[in-house]
Amino acid sequence: MAETTSEATGTLLWCAPSGSFAFVAPDDRDGPDLFVHCSDLAGDARGGGRPVEGEAVVYELGAGASGPWARNVRRRT
């Protein structure tokens, strides 16, 4: 079972052309970029769209069987 552990900031690096997944580069830690499933790219609270490549984001850091991942990824305001 996956568990969300904390909230962090980073940059949305790359989105798959299919739109099914993306990667986030964390601001506050060394290590690999974090996987993001497309269902975890969220619009902002003001009704804006999903974040795009190169945009600053805030996300929840999750931990699961496959390692750390980003969820609830949204534009940093």
Image: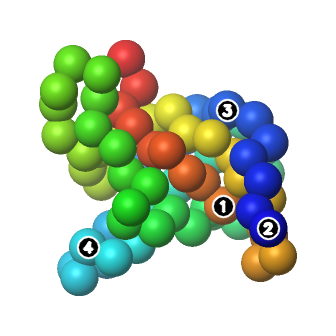
Which is more toward the observer, 23 or 71?
71
Q: What residue is disc 3 on?
A: 7
x%, y% of residue 65? 82, 76
Q: Which mark is residue 19?
A: 4
Q: CA distance from mark 3 to mark 4?
A: 23 Å
Q: Which mark is residue 53?
A: none
Q: CA distance from mark 1 to mark 3?
A: 12 Å
- The residue lying at 30 percent from left, 22 percent from top is 45
Q: What residue is disc 1 on?
A: 69
x%, y% of residue 22? 42, 67
- The residue lying at 37 percent from left, 65 percent from top is 38
x%, y% of residue 19? 26, 73
Give above or below for 6 relative to 73. Answer: above
Q: Residues within 10 Å of mark 4 (few under 14, many from 20)?
A: few
In the rendered structure, which amino acid carries the disc numbered 3?
Glu
Q: Are marks 4 and 1 in contact (CB under 8 Å)?
A: no
In the rendered structure, which amino acid carries the disc numbered 4?
Gly
Q: Are marks 3 and 4 in contact (CB under 8 Å)?
A: no
Q: Earlier in the sequence, mark 2 or mark 3?
A: 2
Q: Are marks 2 and 3 in contact (CB under 8 Å)?
A: no
Q: Residues within 10 Å of mark 3 (few under 14, many from 20)?
A: some
Q: CA distance from mark 1 to mark 2?
A: 13 Å
Q: CA distance from mark 2 to mark 3?
A: 19 Å
Q: Secondary structure at mark 2?
A: loop
Which is more toward the observer, 64 or 29?
64
| Image quadrant where residue 16 sits | bottom left
Q: Earlier in the sequence, mark 1 or mark 2?
A: 2
Q: What residue is disc 2 on?
A: 1
In the rendered structure, which amino acid carries the disc numbered 1?
Trp
